């Protein structure tokens, strides 16, 4: 497809389980960003990649969160031992030059 | 540290009124970029504009205009003759061109009432 694709679109999980969220950026986009959107909290920066490396991981809320990107393309955000406060929409965006971000539709994560 | 503040959480105006969304930013950098994004009810964020810190000219695009004032660290967004389709959450953002990290404000939810 032409846009940023995220899967799953919805994920319901039980507290304590691990989840993996996937982002497929626009082909050729070197930069990839993960944000978290909670009600009333705006867009919280989590991590971004230039190619396969992540120059800035400062936004990851805790060591339960990790992300990787392989082949300069697909990225996965993993949350281990999920907690209820992890419930949010996780947004991925890609960019060719950091000028304009193209966002996916997000993954709505609900931790019960 | 960089920070973006959108003090208006929610605004409601009647259709055809003008409305201004405020954005105040903090950065120690002399070179930076400012952005506005729109998130309509469908959910996907859409890029509206980017402004370089060296370019303080105001910009107009149709009914949209942006007022960048370095002296007050503000980058306000005005919609003229608002329409119902303008209803959305609007985010202001700031980036450091050295590393392309982009920080967003908490957004302003705009309701345009018919």
Image: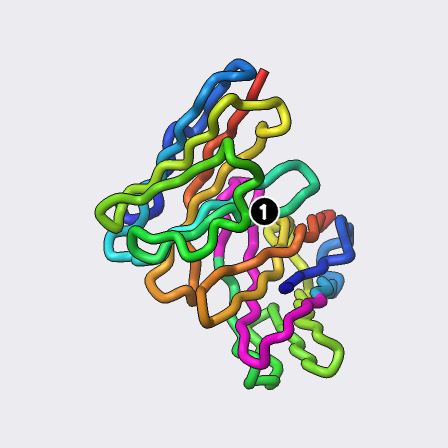
Say left or right for B43 vs A67: right
Looking at the picture, how far across and down is residue A46, in whole percent? 51, 46
Q: Is residue A81 visible?
A: yes
Residue B99 vs A7, above or below: the answer is below
Q: Secondary structure at mark 1?
A: strand
Looking at the picture, how far across and down is residue A26, in whole percent? 30, 51
Say left or right for B22 vs A14: right
Q: Mark 1 falls within which chain?
A: A
Residue B13 vs A98, above or below: the answer is above
Looking at the picture, how far across and down is residue B103, in whole percent? 57, 58
Depth check: give the residue in front, B100 or B9: B100
Looking at the picture, how far across and down is residue B46, in whole percent? 49, 54
Residue range (magenta):
B24-46
Residue at 69% across, 80% down: B69
Say left or right for A7 vs B88: left
Depth check: give the residue in front, A47 or A31: A47
Query: Which residue has dot 1 on it?
Result: A44
Query: Which quadrant of the figure contains the N terminus of chain B?
Result: bottom right
Say left or right for A104 vs B95: left
Q: Is residue A5 visible?
A: no
Residue at 43% across, 24% down: A19
Is residue B38 magenta-colored?
Answer: yes
Outermost residue on the left side: it is: A71
Dot 1 crowding, Cα within 10 Å, few <14, some 14–19, many 20+: many
Residue at 57% across, 32% down: A88
Residue at 43% across, 63% down: A100
């Amino acid at each position: 497809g032409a846009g940023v694709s995220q899967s799953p679109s919805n994920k319901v999980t039980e507290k304590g389980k691990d989840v993996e969220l996937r982002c497929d950026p626009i082909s050729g986009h070197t930069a990839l960003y993960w944000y978290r959107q909670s009600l009333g909290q705006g867009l919280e920066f989590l991590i971004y990649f230039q190619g396969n490396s992540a120059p800035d991981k400062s936004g990851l809320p805790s060591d339960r969160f990790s992300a990787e990107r392989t082949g300069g393309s697909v990225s996965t955000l993993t949350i281990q031992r999920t907690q209820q406060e992890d419930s949010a929409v996780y947004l991925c965006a890609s960019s060719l030059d950091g000028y304009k971000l193209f966002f996916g539709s997000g993954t709505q994560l609900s931790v019960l | 540290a960089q920070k973006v503040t959108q003090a208006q959480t929610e605004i409601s105006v009647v259709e055809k009124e003008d409305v201004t969304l405020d954005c105040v930013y903090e950065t120690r950098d002399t070179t930076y970029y400012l952005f506005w994004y729109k998130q309509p009810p469908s959910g996907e964020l859409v890029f509206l504009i980017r402004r370089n810190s060296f370019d303080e000219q105001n910009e107009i695009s149709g009914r949209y205009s942006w007022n960048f004032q370095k002296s007050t660290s503000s980058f306000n967004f005005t919609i003229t003759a608002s329409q119902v389709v303008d209803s959305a959450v609007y985010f202001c953002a700031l980036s450091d061109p050295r590393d392309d990290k982009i920080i967003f404000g908490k957004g302003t939810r705009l309701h345009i009432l018919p």
